[in-house]
Amino acid sequence: MLALLLTASCVRSTDFEVEAVPPRLVVGAHFAPGEPWRVFVSGTVGFGELQQPVFIDDALVEILDAGTPVATARFEREFWPGTTIVRREEYVSDYPVVSGGRYGIRVSATGFDPAEGEDLVPSPATAPEIAVLGVGINPGIRARVTLSDSDPGPNYFHLLFYLRAIGDTVRGNPISIFQDPFNASQVATTDVGGVALNIGEWTGLLLNDENFTEGKRELSLGLGQLFESYEDRRNELELRVELRSVSKAYYDYYVSAIRQLELQGFAFAEPVPVFNNVSGGLGNVSGYAPVFSPWVVVR
């Protein structure tokens, strides 16, 4: 205690100045074969500004194919039924995407310098296989996923899991990778390695093919939130997995963003810069190619 008081008595205030930085556009966009373009546009928030980034709904968002503008994305906003609370706001386009193509986004908005990013869409992997091993609590569902990868590496993947009632025709609700409640790290605590991503519809597991053996990898996974149980819903639900072959830009962005979030609250931690491939602004523009397993019954 004495040492603490002596140390405290030596503290003195220090004045410093923060250089003003002009606002920049923040752009997030993913594109894939068979999927609509989805683009999110906001602006940076200055140091000391206690506000959330504001979505920009009057930007010009151009779709690029091999560097050439080919379409303009339209803005859409959706509210939760019966409320004025925004459920979804984004720019969308149905411009077709093919694996191997190079696509991009160019954004212009009043008060900002133009921002632009592009990426190559990878080839799809072989459709994954999934088997339900059991249900319980912590994790709610135990599953085994088998992945195949015949392309020479390095390759990068994003696994996403969906759950729905048997008989439904919807895509399903995302279900997260279960994480040990005594380990706050976002790194998956199963034997698979990889990085768990728990952000809404992007919830899943990011991994690469470093640990594939002869082009194959078998993963034992726990799914569900803490204390979430499916015991009373056996034979009522079905599960499937989406395997996205993602670009390195997609993988690097999410992994670096998660690593940075992990370090919040640690004043002397080595900073982790978030990957950025948007010139003139900040953000991520990246492609992926999805394949899906069949639906399997949770039993």
Image (cartoon, rainbow, N blue to C red):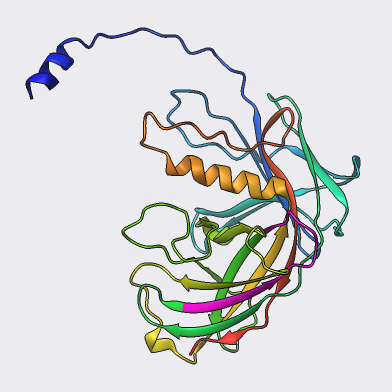
Determine the residue positioned at 82% across, 58% down: 94
Q: Position of residue 192 (x, y in %)?
A: 53, 64
* Relative height, residue 299 to residue 220 (above, below): below
* Relative height, residue 173 to residue 249 (above, below): below
Point out the image quarter for the N terminus: top left
Q: Position of residue 250 (x, y in %)?
A: 68, 49
- Residue found at the very far left of the displayed protein: 2
Q: For this view, does 213 lie left or right of residue 162?
A: right
Q: Is residue 75 visible?
A: no
Bounds of the magenta segment: 142-156
Q: For this view, does 58 lie left or right of residue 220?
A: right
Which quadrant holds residue 244? bottom right
Q: For this view, does 64 lie left or right of residue 154?
A: right
Determine the residue positioned at 76% across, 72% down: 126
Q: Position of residue 134 (x, y in %)?
A: 45, 85
Taking depth in this image into account, of 115 and 267 the one nearest to the observer is 267
Q: Position of residue 131 (x, y in %)?
A: 57, 83
Determine the residue positioned at 41% across, 32% down: 269
Which quadrant holds residue 128? bottom right
